[in-house]
Amino acid sequence: MSFSEEFELLLRARYPLIYIPTLEEERVEAAIAKSAKPQGNRAVYIWDFVDGYQGNPNDLGFGKRNPLQALELVEKLPAEAPAIFILRDYYRFLEDISISRKLRNLSRRLKSQPKNIVIISPQIAIPSDLSEVLTILEFPLPAVGEIKLEIERLLAANGQSLNSKFIDELVRSCQGLSLERIRRVLARAIATDGEIQPENIELVLEEKRQTIRQTQILDFYPATEKISDIGGLDNLKEWLLRRGGSFSERARQYGLPYPRGLLLVGIQGTGKSLTAKAIAHHWHLPLLRLDVGRLFGGLVGESESRTRQMIQLAEALAPCVLWIDEIDKAFGGIDGKADAGTSSRVFGTFITWLAEKTSPVFVVATANNIQALPPEMLRKGRFDEIFFVGLPSQEERRAIFAVHLSRLRPHNLKSYDLDRLAYETPDFSGAEIEQTLIEAMHIGFSQNRDFITDDILEAASQLVPLARTAQAQIQFLQDWAAAGKARMASRNSGLNSRIQHQLQHPES
């Protein structure tokens, strides 16, 4: 149901007090005015603290700097006169006892009158004593059709025409921005170049990054890593490559639903975060990083509001990849948190969205401690697949060494004994292999020469891998995956290569 349809339904059902959280005042007021016409051609009165009521000459300035008086106009009008009263920034006065009482009195009276009070606010801030009488109505960011109309209007005003393919690309890049921001960034492009050009898409993307930074919930993450940068994990890579075209229009015509997402469970440093970045780069999708801790605010209702804002923004930017790193730390043990149930409500909103979303938001969540995750997170339907990312096998360690060394010493790669390096580093994760190479570079640099295979082996001998310091946790993860709870990301198990090494070198 669209905003207009839902708003008109509330008018017909005589919901007296409606609360709309949005930063787009101008756009929502235009939508309200449009919806008022088929509802008995209701008069629309707009009030703000500085100017009072505006528009109607008879009431011009009424209630200026007096929020309580602003509500008195509702009573002054005849009971049978249909009207909508828009109150800007009125959330700031809701804690006042006189205003709270007045609104509750009006909510009773307006149930039998064709009048509605609409509070427009940039955020949700509702006192508990008004929670029963105020109805929250979400106002979505502009949809594709609305953005396209606005771009075509700006092009016509500038006497410019563009081919439909570029317009579609521009519309897609503008998704997730408010209409005001779209107008502003395109006006900037026209002021700079005299017209809108294909290169201006980068301006739009920068505006999008600015918007995301201002929310302080999501980060627009640059994704430069490639699938080829991942050493090993052949099953996972094959699964991802098979779904590379799943966001295309051809896939929709074929009848394929959008991919939902992945949960990557495994040992720290095995490439889970790298995989999230590589997916976005390979699929040519923007990568949004969610720090779940930012969802939680100190005010009542703020955490739930931020969660809804995050979902709305991610869906508006779709198709995109939403990366949630270490989700086990965010939602681990939520039942025991003494926060009046806020964590449970945020978690409930989040997993309900995971299960029911139809938008092309591909969620990549990573977790190190599977025991900390609530069982609801692991149920089928939340993610397309759960992959276990274990320690790399000897063959995979060789591939990881090759990836790093081809980046660090592309001209000298053949001088390194990759087979020996892979054999001598059992239990090492990808992150530990990278750290070993950095330490080897320090050894070579301190002696004014290039680092060699022996330097890498010396550095490896000094590093104690996590597999030895956290054996119990890793063994639990491996047993959990081996029991069929998750799909193996690798064709070869790092555990097998470790056992093999111990059989051949029992003293190690």
Image (cartoon, rainbow, N blue to C red):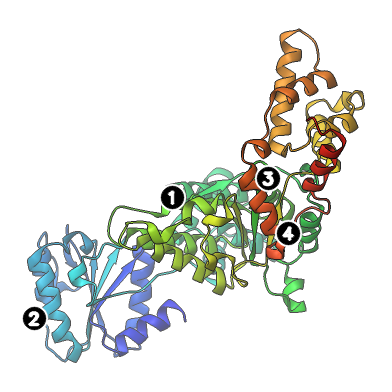
> Which of the two residues, 410 or 99, is positioned nearer the viewer here?
410
Circle 2/circle 1 CB separation < 8 Å:
no
Residue 218 is left or right of residue 130, and the answer is right
- Tell me what residue is drawn at x 62 percent, y 40 percent: 470
Is disc 3 placed on a helix, strand or loop?
helix
* Cα distance in 3D space between marks 2 and 3: 64 Å
Residue at the image point whose x is 68% and y is 66% from the top: 164
Report, in whole angstroms, how far the alpha carbon at label 4 lies from the one at label 1. Answer: 32 Å
In terms of secondary structure, where does tag 2 sit?
Answer: helix
Q: Secondary structure at mark 4?
A: helix
Disc nearest the viewer among 4 and 3: 4
In this orientation, does residue 62 appear?
A: no
- State the residue at coordinates (55%, 43%): 192
Front residue (pair 165, 360): 360
Q: From mark 4 to mark 3, how far is it between C-alphas? A: 24 Å
Label 3 sits on residue? 274
The amino acid type of the residue labelled 1 equals Gly
Neighbourhood count class around disc 2 (C-alpha, 10 Å): few under 14, some 14–19, many 20 upward = few
Q: Secondary structure at mark 1?
A: helix
- Residue 482 numbered tag: 4
Q: Position of residue 90 (x, y in %)?
A: 21, 64
Mark pair 2, 1: CA separation: 48 Å
Q: Residues within 10 Å of mark 3 (few under 14, many from 20)?
A: some
User: Where does label 2 land, which residue?
Assistant: 76
Give how far apart the Cα atoms at labels 1 and 3 are.
21 Å
Residue 57 is situated, as x and y percent measured from the top left of the image, at 16, 72
Which of the two marks, 2 or 1, is nearer to us in this view? 1
Is label 4 or label 1 in front?
Answer: 4
Q: Which mark is residue 293?
A: 1
* Marks 4, 2: nearer the viewer: 4
Query: Nearest the camera: 211 or 502?
Result: 502
